[in-house]
Image (spheres, helix red, strand yellow):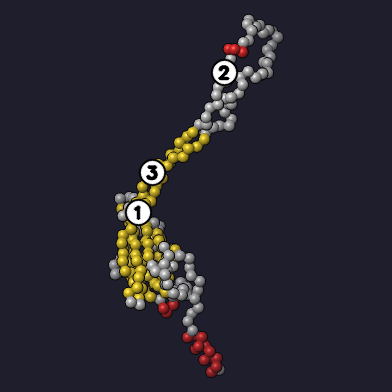
Amino acid sequence: MRLILALLVALAALPALAAERPVAGLMWNRSGLPATLPLQLHSEAGLDHVVMLTPPGGDAPVLAAYIRGGAFFRVLVPPGDWQIAIASGAEWQGGEALFGAATQWTSLPEPLHFGVADGSRREGHMLWLGQEGDQVAITETAPQTICELAGLSSQTRDLRDDSAPDWTRDLTEERPAVRKPPSEPRVSTQALSFDRLPAPQAQRPPLNYQSRELRLRRVFCD
């Protein structure tokens, strides 16, 4: 009995097994709002991170995204004012434990605003993660604005109809005669002269049509 208890105590003291890391990007969005505004983070290799957005004064995050350290990362977030908190660690242990007992936390003292200005400017933010001593910290922030610019795109299409007349057809080819009733005999007053037939027309080039569509381009404007 004592041996079993000793084994249980020893197993409880072992660290939790690492789980497979999530795919980088959005983990979940429980805000009920569409995610349309940019949040970009720069980090160093070595540790992974989970960024969480919480309403000011709230105690439950409404959005979480996974970041693999050192890799480019940008995620779209909902409009509003959000408190930013970031959990960091080396061994992922699941959505509840995050990085286990070794999880490090850093956050911004004030919420960040994400919104749309002038109807076409999507205003978000960039964050830089670094080390301050042995702790991960948000070392720098900057606005990031994406502008939507309208423009026309054109595309040439060949509108030649395969069922259209063949303009190179020889007009002197034989055609079946049209029979008329016997009561109306055909009387020819002059011989048919092929010299009076119009010359065959040259092949016409395909008809081109410029289709122009209104498209939106998203560019960094700040």
Circle 3 — which element?
A: strand
Work out whether residue 90 can be spotted.
yes
Residue 52's quadrant in the figure? bottom left
Mark identifier at residue 81: none
Q: Residue furthest right?
A: 182
Q: Which comes before the other along the chain, label 2 or label 3? A: 3
- Is residue 78 visible in the rendered image? The answer is no
User: 47 or 115: which is nearer to us?
Assistant: 47
Earlier in the chain: of badge 1 and badge 2, it is 2
Q: Amino acid at mark 1?
A: Phe
Tell me the element at label 2.
Answer: loop
Give the distance between the C-alpha atoms of the residues marked 1 and 2, in whole angstroms.
Answer: 61 Å
The single residue placed furthest to the top in the displayed view is: 189
Tag shown at residue 199: 2
Task: Give the labeled residue for mark 1.
Answer: 220
Q: Are marks 1 and 3 in contact (CB under 8 Å)?
A: no
Q: Is residue 183 above or below residue 142?
A: above
Write the residue at 41% across / 78% down.
102
| Crowding near the residue tagged with mark 2, few <14, some 14–19, many ≥20 C-alpha atoms within 10 Å | few
Residue plotted at (40% across, 65% down)? 63
Q: Which quarter of the figure is the C terminus placed in?
A: bottom left
Tag 3: amino acid: Gly
Q: List the residue tagged with mark 3.
A: 151
Residue that appears at 42% across and 70% down? 45
Position of residue 219 in the picture relative to residue 95 (left or right): left
* Amino acid of disc 2: Ala
Q: Secondary structure at mark 1?
A: strand
Q: Residue at the bottom extreme? A: 2
